[in-house]
Image: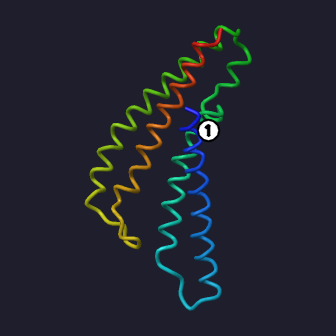
Amino acid sequence: MKLIYKLFKAGALISLVAMIAAVTIQVFARFFLESAPHWTEEAARIFFVYSVGFGTSIGIKNGDFIRLDLITKYLTGRLNKWLNIFTDLAVIVFAVILTAHSIKFVQLGMDELSPALQITMGFVFISITLIGLSVILFTMANLYHSFKRK
């Protein structure tokens, strides 16, 4: 899991840096060149989507997403543990549904090309599958640690 987490962290960083680079090129070209490259806006959007895809796993691992803080203040330790387990199971069910439907979406995008970069949209849409799988994987790890703790 540590290796996968590091890979997702690197993916998020690379995607974010690439997005910033694409936007910087676009801004520079608009101010200092006669015309801006047509591909930078589309590339920035794709890199943004992938930074979200990779960043989702980081947020789950760090416990930054699903929390019911208002409710947990009033519950005992044991009830809190069961609430966290229920929340993790609900998130996993949602992620499984998301992943299953995202695969169909990727298949639809395989025949479609992006207008500026001329890459298959399946490459862009697979980021949704990446999000679903990372949510499943890291939430299952959280669930495992919930049962492992006494």
Per the image, the residue denoted by label 1 is 59
Q: Quadrant of residue 144?
A: top right
Tell me if mark 1 has few (under 14), some (14-19) or many (20+) residues whose alpha carbon lies within 10 angstroms of its own. some
- Residue 123 image position (x, y, % from top left): 38, 56
Q: Nearer the viewer, residue 67 or 37?
A: 37
Q: Is residue 72 above or below residue 13?
A: above
Q: Quadrant of residue 84?
A: top right
- Please say which color scheme the image uses: rainbow
- Residue 23 image position (x, y, % from top left): 60, 70
Residue 95 appears left or right of 44: left
Residue sitting at 68 percent across and 20 percent down?
Answer: 71
Residue sitting at 70 percent across and 12 percent down?
Answer: 75
Q: Is residue 71 above or below residue 31?
A: above
Residue 118 appears left or right of 46: left
Q: Residue furthest bottom?
A: 34
Residue sitting at 59 percent across and 83 percent down?
Answer: 29
Q: Nearer the viewer, residue 126 or 78?
A: 126
**Secondary element type, mark 1:** helix
Q: Nearer the viewer, residue 75 or 2?
A: 2
Q: Quadrant of residue 70?
A: top right
- Residue 19 image position (x, y, % from top left): 57, 63
Residue sitting at 39 percent across and 49 percent down?
Answer: 126
All told, the count of numbered labels is: 1
Quadrant including the N terminus? top right
| Circle 1: residue type | Gly
- Residue 150 image position (x, y, % from top left): 65, 8
Q: Residue furthest front?
A: 3
